[in-house]
Image (spheres, helix red, strand yellow):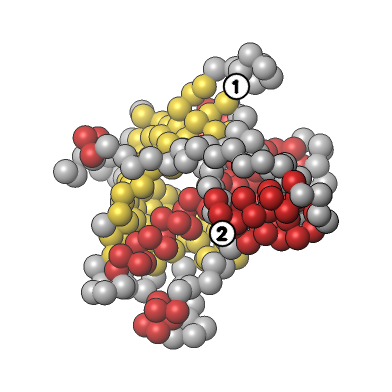
Amino acid sequence: MVLFEIEYRVRLPREEMWSLREDPEFLRWQYEHSSDMSNLEIVEKNVDAADPDRITVTWRITPSVPLPQFVLAYVGEGAGIYIEDVHEYRLSKPYYINFRSHPNMFQEYTETRGECEFVDEPADSADAQAGTRVCIRGEVIVNVPLVGPYVENFVVNNLRNFYTGFPDLVHSYVAAKNGRLNPDDSQMWLNPESSVHVQPNTAEANEASAIHGAGADVAPALAALQRSLPPSVDASLASVPVASGAPEAIPESIQAPSRSWWPWQ
């Protein structure tokens, strides 16, 4: 089992962000402008007949992230894999979701579950715009001998990578809807407010800095920096000019969550 905690911020009021998450147009925007999935849809939304305050929404996500070889060894090449993601919330308690998800294969062996909370943030004094902080906490369980821990970490890493760029998907969609961005423009904005950060490999980042500091051509330095970034990071991040001297460390904001809040422990 692997515990995870992810947090990001968007420049939208909480009510607007809560409504946006199930907007069919925004769902389409996500898979058309994200390299992590090829389809995203809500396949079912139910009101509990015995408890009308309780809403259950079932999502289907078709990932486009390449599967590890040890997973392909089980399912075979060309296997059609999708993720079923079930959200439960109450009308009397909005902005709080319990979720559970699993792939269509090996349902009895793997599950990701947890909670997601939408926290209202007042307008920032700098831009006078209210925002929403979204906190996702959960655990990944893969009960498969030998490969289970590898799959668990694979799932968590992909969640982190997706939510690194998710605020950009939100902001670009809102801009396109308001006529400030061409809807056909697939260029994602780099969002400085995202709280999910990637720490480059220090040795290779220092190599890039040393090359540039010596006055050499910038191309080898950028290439060295790009090699220091994980493959999942967009190459546009490596286009930032490399400054001389040791790079400033990027704080890792995804912390191991405390166990005290887990309702099932």
| Residue 173, quarter of picture | top right
Against 73, residue 150 (above or below) is above
- Residue hosting label 1: 130
Residue 9 pos. (x, y %): 54, 33
In the image shown, does 3 or 81 lie closer to the viewer? 3
Q: Secondary structure at mark 1?
A: loop
What residue is shown at x 71% (from left), y 60% (from top)? 223
Q: Say whether disc 1 or disc 2 marks the residue closer to the N-terminus.
A: 1
In the image shown, does 231 or 104 lie closer to the viewer? 231
| Image quadrant occupied by the C terminus | top left
Q: Residues within 10 Å of mark 1 (few under 14, many from 20)?
A: some
| Image quadrant occupied by the N terminus | bottom left
Q: Are marks 1 and 2 in contact (CB under 8 Å)?
A: no
- Residue hosting label 2: 230
Residue 5 pos. (x, y %): 38, 42
Amino acid type assigned to the residue bearing label 1 in the image: Ala
Residue 174 pos. (x, y %): 70, 38
Residue 40 numbered mark, or none: none
Amino acid type assigned to the residue bearing label 2 in the image: Pro
| Residue 107, quarter of picture | bottom left
Residue 111 pos. (x, y %): 31, 60
Q: Is residue 154 visible?
A: yes
